[in-house]
Amino acid sequence: MKNASVYKALFCCIVGCVFFMPIFAQERGKVEVIKDPRIDTLIAKRFSVKGKTASTNAAAPYSSNGYRVQIYSGSDRRAAYNAQAKFQQRFPDIRTYITYVEPNFKVHAGDFRTHLAAEKMMQQLKGSFLSLFIIPEKINPTKADQSND
């Protein structure tokens, strides 16, 4: 009989610790970050290598996810540069990018944050270029985005 009461008391103690202890162990609204101080040094070094200081807006992106319109894809280098020139005459303020992945040259235009903006550009280009595609890529921030820092 004594053993049964000891086991019962032990069981109640274990159940109490398992279910009620976590409730008392939590505090709301307090977070303690423990980190090596060398991390701040590495972050500052990264910004100095990139040409910015750590005191500037660290959240400002160098590039972000977005979309570009592919206006040319083919193996003819001259045709790629002609497509780029044709686009630049019509839209001088929009950046174009030529890439070469053997055996093809690709010409991408724009730095669009949304798919909808890329679609609008693609609609304006229909008839001027044969094959148009919207390509998800890392885009460069526009001049207006950089001046908001």
Image (cartoon, grey):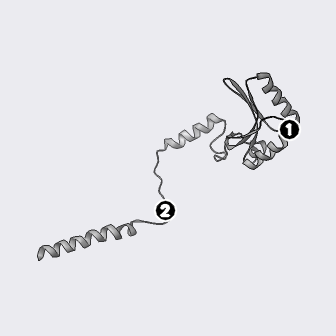
Direction from residue 82 to residue 64 in the image, left or right: left
Label count reads 2
Residue highlighted by disc 2: 30
Residue highlighted by disc 1: 127
Direction from residue 58 to residue 5 in the image, left or right: left
**Looking at the rendering, which quadrant does residue 143 occupy?**
top right
Query: Residue 55: horizontal and vertical position, in percent?
Result: 64, 45
Near mark 1 (Cα within 10 A), the count class, few <14, some 14-19 or many ≥20, is few
Reply above or below: 34 against 7: above
Numbered disc in front, either 1 or 2? 1
Give the distance between the C-alpha atoms of the residues marked 1 and 2, in whole angstroms: 60 Å
Query: Residue 117: horizontal and vertical position, in percent?
Result: 77, 48
Observer-nearest of 143 and 108: 108
At 68% across and 23% down in the image, what residue appears?
A: 103
Query: Residue 141: horizontal and vertical position, in percent?
Result: 72, 42
Observer-nearest of 12 and 36: 12
Direction from residue 77 to residue 128 in the image, left or right: right
SS type, badge 1: loop
